[in-house]
Amino acid sequence: MSSLKILKELLDYYYSPDDPGTAWISVFTPSELLTSMDLRCFYPENAAATLSGSNKNTALLDYSRSVGYSGNICSYALLYAARSKQTSKYRRVPEPGLLATANNQCGTLLYWWESFKKEYGLPVQFINYPKCEGEFSPEEIKYIDSQYVQLIEAAETRFGRRFNEKRLGAVMENSLRANKLWKEIQLLRKTSYIPPRVFTETLLPMVIAKGEARTGDYYEELLDEIKAEYSGNTLKKRILWLGYPFWFLKEKYPRLKDDAGIVMDIYTSHWILDYTGESMMDKLVNAYGKMFMNMSLDWKIKYVESIVSEYQIDGVITHLNKSCKRDSIALFLINQHLKEKRGLPALVVESDMANPDWYNSESIQLNIEAFLELL
Amino acid sequence: MNEYLTDTANIKNILLKHRASYAAYAGYFCSYFPSELLYGFNVHPVRIQGYSESLGQRRALINYICSYLADIMNAFESDHFSWADHLIVPATCDSLYGAKEYLERNIQGINVKMFRPPLKFDEGTYQFYKSSVEDVLEWMGSHYTFDDTALKRGVEMKNRMTTGISELLSSDEGLFKGAVYLKLMIARSVLPAPVFMCMLESMDKAVVGQNHNKAQTNLLVLGPICDNLDLIDYLNTDHNVITRFLTSTLGLHDCEVSLEGDVKDNLISHYFRRAGTVTSYDHYSKLISELDTEIMERSVKGVIYINYKYCEPHMFFSKSIKDHLEKNGVKMLYLELEHSGGIDASIQNHIDTFTENI
């Protein structure tokens, strides 16, 4: 079976009109806990990225501003606030029976979810992760763990279901398999040039269905297909992309010259999670508490340096994303570090992941071209 | 009064002049950390205020970070915070966390520590809050020796500063949200106690009262961190409106800490429960309930909601607050301003037009 066919099955399931019990969660909330209770997880960030890619994006943004939203809030939230105005088949999302989010990837999500709370009259299950400086202390692990238990209890109460550890074990196995395969696919980029759009186009199952068995099947097929198609592809100028892609661009990244290409990006590799630990809860604490965005700057610098060396990077382009305050300063400092301490050519581009109003195509393209000339 | 205000604006010189009285100065952001604990190390805690004077090049760095922190980052680079030996930065918003990392790498000679309070309030999170405070104390303990008597003395002085403000403004407690109040609270959070007490004693109670009582009661200004004194002055002097804050971190109420029993524990427990800090996890409900009380008690007809650019947590509230106010027949003007540079003619026009139509 081709990967595309499995992807279609996954999407049909995800967007089916039935409502087995739906939780609206942010993309780095431990979805395994909810999937194991046979709940469907819906991700407003993912839906907003899709809206950004639609030809109605600016109209939707205008609408949200016209009804009183600040034009400077996260563009995912701004776009999603206008969801009732778009007409694609994907708009029929079941209303949430549970709302859950966390601060491991972004501090703004809590405020966005507070707006859902007002809209749907549901409490927000908020998982508060301490910033991770390398390893969590026993007290921090206990703190995160207790919040996972609260999330489970809230789901049990809301949907009248019992949490089953054995079922969680099966879902975790699926997640670990998908995670391992996604990592293997990313590692192919060390030796072969694979256009970055391949990763933005195939990331979706990792985001919305990593606990499903079919997700592993999908990535297994995909791994073989990518190997067959791109093996041996090479490039003269190897670029590392730091930060978000641009969801409103067809190719999701600016155009580079023929001899240059983005051989690695940090964004799609966020979904390689660290499921280490003895118990299942420990694994989930590490996977979601130690994801890139929640780590200290020192950790991030070391991580990016390892990518620079393993992927033989010639230059770095950093996207400072107006919508992502968490990313902006950290990526600016990483860019500064690579340039000043490592002597690596590094360019900063300021724009936004989902709002094309903030994307100055001409100026960005000119800067990139000049930068590539220097390599 | 003017002399006093000039002095508080020139905090750097005052602090440098009194450096010998303390082992060190520690700057801190927001009221999440029980700053009085630092007195136990003979370290004077100084709340980091924004720098409302324009500092020029700051936007060359990163355009879209919180303009309050962008100003502070630039002010550090421009040597305005050269008095600081240590900095305690709470990881309570993404921009603050980023600012900590930026300052740590780009400013020489200051020890920076991140304070990681829980972002939600329930009994289960208290132990975590306490351990986060102790983490900062351990860090400070690696530089200085802790002394219970010094802590008690420091807290006692701080309590006296609070009482002093209350007495000075006791003529009309209901209008404490005005500029005079704000300026006194800022001074309380930055000046060494003897300097503050000396200033307080030299102020003329009658003049302060007169100045303070002019505010009208039917306009309300909301803002998260309004330390733009030009703006506050414009609103209070030219329009006589009441100014209050979304997060009441500058609230005078509930500032006194008990000296009975273990003062250190009292402080930690007090800050954890204090309004405007971690207890404000459910920001919106708390704010709406405060707003409703204010609207009812003062017959408020219009609200000017001022936010600093790119302060995302507070930008999110604008729509909900507008909807809520409109439902209650109260008009709202929403302004997003750069932190520095005071207020220009177009902002004044906006404010003038709005107030004239109320």
Image (cartoon, coloured by chain):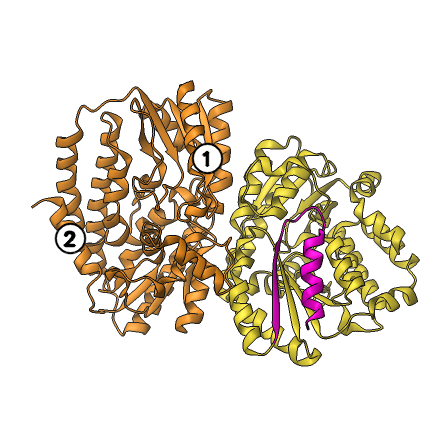
Labels in figure, total: 2
Along the viewing direction, whichever of A218 and A62 lies nearer the viewer: A62
Tell me the kind of residue under disc 1: Val
What are the residue bounds of the magenta stretch? B330-358
Residue B344 screen position, x and y as percent: 71, 51
Q: Residue at x 77, y 55 (%)?
A: B188
Q: Is residue A175 above or below residue B319?
A: above
Q: Residue at x 12, y 31 (%)?
A: A228
Residue A158 image-quadrant placement: bottom left
Left or right: residue A5 versus residue B291 is: left
Q: Which mark is residue B26?
A: none
Q: Earlier in the sequence, mark 2 or mark 1?
A: 2
Residue B144 screen position, x and y as percent: 69, 40
User: Residue B231 colored magenta?
Assistant: no
Residue B59 image-quadrant placement: top right
Contact? badges 2 and 1 (CB < 8 Å): no
Left or right: residue B192 versus residue B109 is: right
Q: Secondary structure at mark 2?
A: helix
Q: Say whether residue B219 is visible.
A: yes
Q: Say whether residue B143 is visible.
A: no
Q: Which mark is residue A8?
A: 2
Residue B346 screen position, x and y as percent: 68, 54
In the rendered image, what is the letter of the chain coloured orange? A
Q: Chain B takes which shade in the image?
A: yellow
The quadrant of the rendering that contains the C terminus of chain A is top left
Kindly identify which chain the residue marked by label 1 belongs to: A
**Disc 2 and disc 1 on one polypeptide chain:** yes
Dot 1 surroundings within 10 Å: few (below 14), some, or many (20 or more)? some
Q: Residue at x 54, y 58 (%)?
A: B315
Q: Which mark is residue A349?
A: 1
Dot 2 surroundings within 10 Å: few (below 14), some, or many (20 or more)? few
